[in-house]
């Protein structure tokens, strides 16, 4: 009887020993899932540094990420409302590689666009109320130095999740990404102030980003001018786009002001509101003309 028990123990020990090199004791799936979850969190947060540091080649990853507009407001709005789930896993420490399938759940942005939003703010609101769609991607892993796991196919994952979103043509211009700043041209004493007798006009300039400069010439714009709160110019298309597209000039001449007496720009406050044909506001700013 004692011999039978001893032989059973020996057989069991041999079985355990043989399985120690198999997946039963392999932590690869657990470690890769933890890494994959962190990688997905970084992607949904659009954090380039956090994404890159989880990859097998951080420098190469940063170069790849430079081709993706992670600050794109449309992309950020969608991923802010996204979640993910890990699916089937196949990772092996012995092989030094693995992969996990992930499902990313995002708002159905095409459904939101079908509602014909007039601007980004309206689109963002719609994204919170539409149904969801699923994107499937597979993250591949590679065992690196000191037995640490890294993501090895960053570009494939980014394409799967972000590619179609970034390729989507919006029905309106996203001016937040196309306009750098606005300013009143050649003010006399700072603080958006002109001297009356020194000026025959006020000018509001819109300065574009590098992306906006490529599109500025195609924008169909108009603007309104208010003097002391009263509308004096409506739907003017008297604006100038520089040949480089880097700036756009809008104006109010002294003769446009009802109280003009031939003595320079009338004293008061001037407000210029620049819009496109959809009513999206590109600029809304106020300056002051004072006596000198």
Image: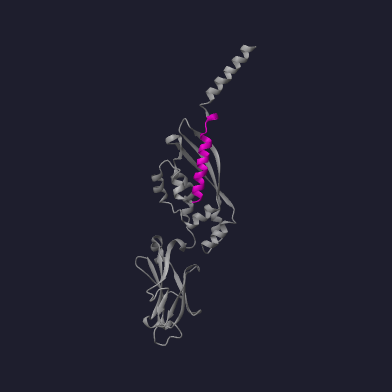
Q: Give coordinates of residue 83: x percent, y percent.
A: 56, 48
Q: Residue 81 appears at what percent x and percent y?
A: 55, 53
**Residue 132 belongs to magenta span:** no
> Where are the magenta residues, as a range?
23-45
Q: In terms of depth relative to the viewer, which is nearer, 50 or 69? A: 50
* Quarter of the N terminus within the rendering: top right
Residue at figure coordinates x 53%, y 53% from the top left: 80
Q: Quadrant of the C terminus?
A: bottom left
Q: How is the image coloured?
A: one colour
Foreground: 238 or 200? 200
Residue with the most extreme bottom position: 261
Q: Residue furthest left?
A: 243
Instruction: Locate residue 269, reporting x and y percent.
Output: 46, 78
Q: Considering only vertical position in the picture, is 174 above or below 101?
A: below
Give coordinates of residue 231: x percent, y percent.
50, 79
Q: Is residue 9 visible?
A: yes
Is residue 34 located in the magenta-colored stretch of the structure?
A: yes
Place residue 178 in its image quadrant. bottom left
Count of labels shown?
0
| Residue 105 horizontal side relative to residue 48, left or right | right
Residue sitting at 57 percent across and 17 percent down?
10
Vertical placement of 245 versus 237: above or below?
A: above
**Looking at the image, can residue 116 be seen?**
no
- At a point 50% along the width and 57% down the height, the residue shown is 74
């Amino acid at each position: 009887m004692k011999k039978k028990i001893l032989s059973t123990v020996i057989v069991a020990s041999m079985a355990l020993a043989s399985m120690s090199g198999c997946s039963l004791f392999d932590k690869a799936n657990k470690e890769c899932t933890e890494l994959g979850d962190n990688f997905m969190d970084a992607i949904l947060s659009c954090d380039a540094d956090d994404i890159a540091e989880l990859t097998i080649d951080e420098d190469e990853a940063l170069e790849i990420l430079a081709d993706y507009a992670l600050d794109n407001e449309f992309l950020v709005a969608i991923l802010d409302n996204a979640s993910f789930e890990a699916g089937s896993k196949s990772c092996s420490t012995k092989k030094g590689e693995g992969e996990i399938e992930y499902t990313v759940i995002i708002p159905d942005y095409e459904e939101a666009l079908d509602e014909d939003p007039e601007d980004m703010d309206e689109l963002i609101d719609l994204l919170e109320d539409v149904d969801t769609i699923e994107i499937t991607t597979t993250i591949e892993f590679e065992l690196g130095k000191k037995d640490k796991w890294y993501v090895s196919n960053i570009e494939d994952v980014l394409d799967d999740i972000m590619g179609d979103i970034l390729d989507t043509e919006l029905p309106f211009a996203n001016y937040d990404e196309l306009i750098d700043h606005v300013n009143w041209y050649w003010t006399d004493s700072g603080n958006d102030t002109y001297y009356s007798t020194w000026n025959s006009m006020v000018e509001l300039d819109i300065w574009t980003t590098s992306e906006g400069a490529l599109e500025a010439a195609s924008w169909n714009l108009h603007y309104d001018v208010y003097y002391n709160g009263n509308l004096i110019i409506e739907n003017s298309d008297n604006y100038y786009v520089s040949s480089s597209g880097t700036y756009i000039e809008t104006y109010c001449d002294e003769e446009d002001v009802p109280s003009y007496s031939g003595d320079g720009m009338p004293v008061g406050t001037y407000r210029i509101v620049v819009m496109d044909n959809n009513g999206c506001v590109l600029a809304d700013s106020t300056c002051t003309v004072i006596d000198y």
